[in-house]
Amino acid sequence: MGAQSYEPLWVGGWAAEQWKGRARVRLGSKVSAVLALWLLLAGCYGESGKTPEEETTISRPASADKIAFTSDRDGNPEIYVMNSDGTDQTRLTNAPGGDIRPTFSADGTRIAFTSNRDGNPEVYVMNSDGTDQTNLTKTLGEDYGPTFSADGTKIAFTSNQDGNPEIYVMNADGTDQTNLTNEEAAENIAVML
């Protein structure tokens, strides 16, 4: 069986693609090779032997010095933030299900993430301090992989609420969920630039 790929995390102009046991960074104009190397050496993602839900993910806002990440150090996957030097690690979520794949809004004030705390994967948002955790999608399908638009007014995500994985976009408050791809084939990995 070959390596299974996971969704890339888009962070201010770069993507970190995750695979079991290894990681690759595609550089954009906003990040240097030094930061990419730091992310790999810090072990922020690509931990071997973990399920996609346990796989550590990271996100960093373009305008702040904070990093959001997923860790199962307290028994199940939860979202944490820390300073870019690794200090002040703070858990933001504490739910019975897994909270994974955090992504900051460009201004650093909001975090979108995937959670199965209500029984199936849904897209949630919260303030960057962990307050006001809100389920935006509330569908019977699986909704995951959120990413903010550059201006923070829209969120793209993947959902199978229509029977197979498709790319959706919605307003940042969860209204006006629209299937953009609407194909018989499966589409994944929503990215907004």
Image (cartoon, rainbow, N blue to C red):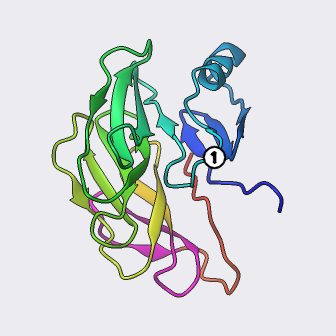
Q: Quadrant of residue 189?
A: bottom right
Which quadrant, please, contains the C terminus?
A: top right
Which quadrant of the figure contains the N terminus? Answer: bottom right
Mark 1 belongs to which amino acid?
A: Gly
Q: Look at the image and say whether residue 162 sits in the magenta stretch.
A: yes
Nearer to the camera, 90 or 163: 90
The residue where tag 1 is placed is 49
- Looking at the rendering, which quadrant does residue 167 occupy? bottom right
The residue that appears at 71% across and 81% down in the rendered structure is 185
Q: Quadrant of residue 151?
A: top left
The single residue placed furthest to the right in the displayed view is 2
Q: Is residue 80 left or right of residue 32?
A: left
Q: Is residue 45 depicted above or below 176 in this figure? A: above
Compared across the picture, whether 2 is left or right of 59 comes to: right
User: What residue appears at the point 67 percent right and 76 percent down from the top-left corner?
Assistant: 186
Q: Which residue is depicted at the point 39% across and 48% down?
A: 77
Residue placed most toward the observer, 99 or 35: 99
